[in-house]
């Protein structure tokens, strides 16, 4: 027997090779290769700790809301924000910052066929998410006189399609040497008894190891070494589904650097008690994010003396990461600072004993995932700053309803309208700020109120907006 197959049998995972003898040679080789990626001891340990009866509820002892730095318009220190911005701009001019997008998710809720970054997201020209980020990064590089490196984390499933999409679009104008794709790791799915599931007779049900897998992937791929060679020590981390994100935000970079933070985060005040975002909290003296599903509703509804929600600070998955902090987190054996896996019950397409496909109607197994915010308690001086939701966060998660392509297009239109208004251009809107004309602004023209205003004031003649407007570089 092949030694790897023997090893799986001894670990109680022999079912992975139940159909091996009737596979063709190429499939056998592939199955052996996939199996060799699996750390059987880790799977056994996760099954023991996360699947068993002992799998406990989340610890909520000594949990309090996390402090955060308020925006000037909400009482924050204006001079300190100005200093932060200046500090961030200097770091950008000195080439210390790179952008980092996690784009390895499966996007099952959106139900779009293809890497999520290729989804057409802008309101008029239907430009893809990747183009929006590429143009923001390109524009910021031009503004600060230093092209920015951009790291994009893909998965096994979407890597080739992602790279091909960039090639097909000539990297959206980015120079090849500044663009880096890194593939994240995978974990096998297991049934509720901890047995590794097959998705077909010759393939293990494997899925990406969560956005927290990005820390390992940055190290393993050599991205951290490349950063070091290039003199980059800060990574601006954001998700692929949020075109509003200020990918390169000087004030955020500045706060991160001025406070000597190893991992910084942006928060928005929760829209209402039940909003489904993680909560920034302090527990046992450490910054943590507690997911909405883990914080009981009566705690989410707690208010302070002024009537404001106590657990107000919602996480929007935007971070600054210090390069050496990532390295430390990626080498847990050396430091003991390891992210812990979470379990998610899922409907996992699999096969029955005879090898026939089974499409489960109910969750039939578990996927294991790492979450990037679990690194926060290990970070020195972690900072949380407030941001305006309307200028940083409108994710595309669902096919319809909240956080959908429609809500995201509307939020982009509202933002373009606000920028125009700041320049004294009147645009008719409904009470939510949504204009009744079609507007689109390429980030190469302007990517925030400030850069938009500068570009707008240079226009001669000033374009009419009454019939709609598209502004390019
Ligand atoms: P989500 O939590 O929205 O998950 O990811 P998802 O897989 O994209 O979508 P659903 O839940 O299947 O509908 C948040 C961000 O983290 C990235 C995603 O690409 C997205 O940018 N992510 C998630 C990864 O890069 N890898 C993962 O393993 C999971």
Image (cartoon, rainbow, N blue to C red):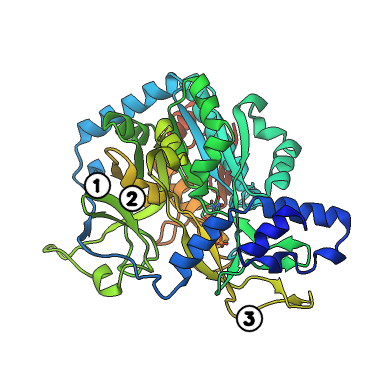
Q: Which residue is drawn at 21% across and 69% down?
A: 302
Q: Residue 267 carries which label?
A: 2
Residue 290 versus residue 126 in the image, above or below = below
- For marks 1 and 3 on the same chain, the one whose residue lies earlier in the sequence: 1
Residue 444 in view, yes or no: no
Q: Mark 1 points at which residue?
A: 68
- For marks 2 and 1 on the same chain, the one whose residue lies earlier in the sequence: 1
Q: Residue furthest bottom?
A: 361
Q: Residue at x 41, y 31 (%)?
A: 324
Secondary structure beneath label 2 = strand
Q: How far, Cα to Cα, is label 1 from label 3?
A: 43 Å
Residue 13 versus residue 179 in the image, above or below = below
Task: Tell me the quarter of the picture where residue 360 sits.
Answer: bottom right
Badge 2, how many Cα within 10 Å: few under 14, some, many 20+? many
Q: Quadrant of ligand 1?
A: bottom right
Secondary structure beneath label 3 = loop
Q: Name the image quarter holding the N terminus.
A: bottom right
Q: Mark 3 points at which residue?
A: 361
Q: Residue at x 34, y 41 (%)?
A: 264
Q: Residue furthest left?
A: 305
Left or right of residue 13, residue 335 in this image: left
- For marks 2 and 3 on the same chain, the one whose residue lies earlier in the sequence: 2
Looking at the rendered image, the disc whose residue lies closer to the viewer, 2 or 3, is 3
Q: CB of mark 2 within 8 Å of CB of mark 1?
A: yes
Q: How far, Cα to Cα, is label 2 from label 3?
A: 37 Å
Mark 3 C-beta closer than 8 Å to ligand 1: no
Badge 1, how many Cα within 10 Å: few under 14, some, many 20+? some
Residue 145 in view, yes or no: yes
Task: Tell me the quarter of the picture where residue 165 sits.
Answer: top right
Q: Which residue is drawn at 66% across and 61% down?
A: 8
Query: Residue 431 at what x, y percent from top left?
Result: 39, 62
């Amino acid at each position: 027997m092949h030694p790897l197959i023997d090893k799986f049998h001894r670990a109680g995972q022999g079912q992975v090779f139940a159909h091996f003898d009737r596979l063709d040679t190429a499939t056998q080789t592939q199955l052996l290769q996939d199996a060799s990626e699996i750390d059987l001891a880790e799977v056994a340990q996760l099954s023991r700790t996360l699947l068993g009866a002992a799998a406990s509820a989340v610890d909520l002892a000594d949990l309090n809301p996390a402090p955060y730095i308020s925006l000037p318009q909400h009482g924050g220190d204006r001079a300190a924000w100005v200093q932060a911005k200046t500090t961030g701009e200097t770091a950008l001019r000195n080439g210390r910052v790179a952008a980092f997008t996690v784009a390895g998710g499966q996007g099952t809720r959106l139900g779009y066929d293809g890497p999520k970054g290729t989804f057409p997201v802008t309101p008029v020209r239907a430009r893809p998410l990747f183009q929006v980020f590429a143009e923001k990064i390109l524009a910021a590089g031009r503004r600060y006189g230093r092209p920015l490196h951009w790291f994009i984390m893909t998965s096994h499933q979407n890597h080739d399609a992602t790279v091909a999409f960039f090639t097909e679009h000539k990297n959206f104008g980015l120079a090849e040497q500044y663009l880096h794709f890194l593939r994240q790791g995978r974990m096998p799915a297991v049934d509720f008894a901890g047995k590794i599931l097959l998705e077909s007779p010759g393939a293990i049900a494997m899925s990406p190891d969560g956005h927290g897998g990005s820390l390992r992937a940055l190290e393993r791929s050599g991205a951290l070494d490349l950063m070091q060679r290039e003199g980059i020590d800060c990574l601006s981390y954001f998700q692929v589904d949020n075109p509003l994100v200020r990918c390169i935000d000087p004030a955020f970079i500045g706060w991160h650097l001025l406070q000597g933070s190893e991992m910084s985060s942006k928060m928005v005040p929760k829209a209402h008690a039940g909003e489904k975002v993680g909560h920034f909290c302090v527990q046992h003296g450490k910054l943590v994010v507690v997911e909405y599903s883990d914080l009981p509703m009566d705690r989410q509804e707690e208010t302070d003396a002024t009537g404001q929600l106590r657990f107000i600070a919602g996480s929007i998955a935007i971070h600054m990461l210090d390069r050496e902090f990532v390295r430390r987190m990626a080498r847990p054996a050396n430091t003991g600072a390891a992210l812990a896996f979470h379990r998610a019950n899922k409907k996992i397409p699999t096969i029955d004993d005879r090898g026939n496909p089974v499409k489960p109607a109910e969750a039939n197994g578990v996927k294991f995932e790492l979450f990037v915010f679990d690194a926060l308690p290990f970070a020195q001086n972690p900072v949380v700053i407030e941001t305006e939701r309307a200028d940083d966060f409108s994710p595309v998660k669902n096919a319809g309803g909240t956080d959908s392509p429609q809500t995201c297009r509307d939020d982009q239109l509202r933002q373009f309208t606000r920028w125009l208004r700041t320049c004294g251009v009147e645009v008719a809107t409904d009470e939510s700020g949504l204009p009744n004309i079609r507007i689109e602004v390429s980030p190469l023209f302007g990517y925030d109120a400030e850069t938009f205003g500068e570009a707008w004031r240079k226009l001669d003649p000033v374009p009419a907006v009454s019939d709609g407007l598209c502004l390019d570089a």
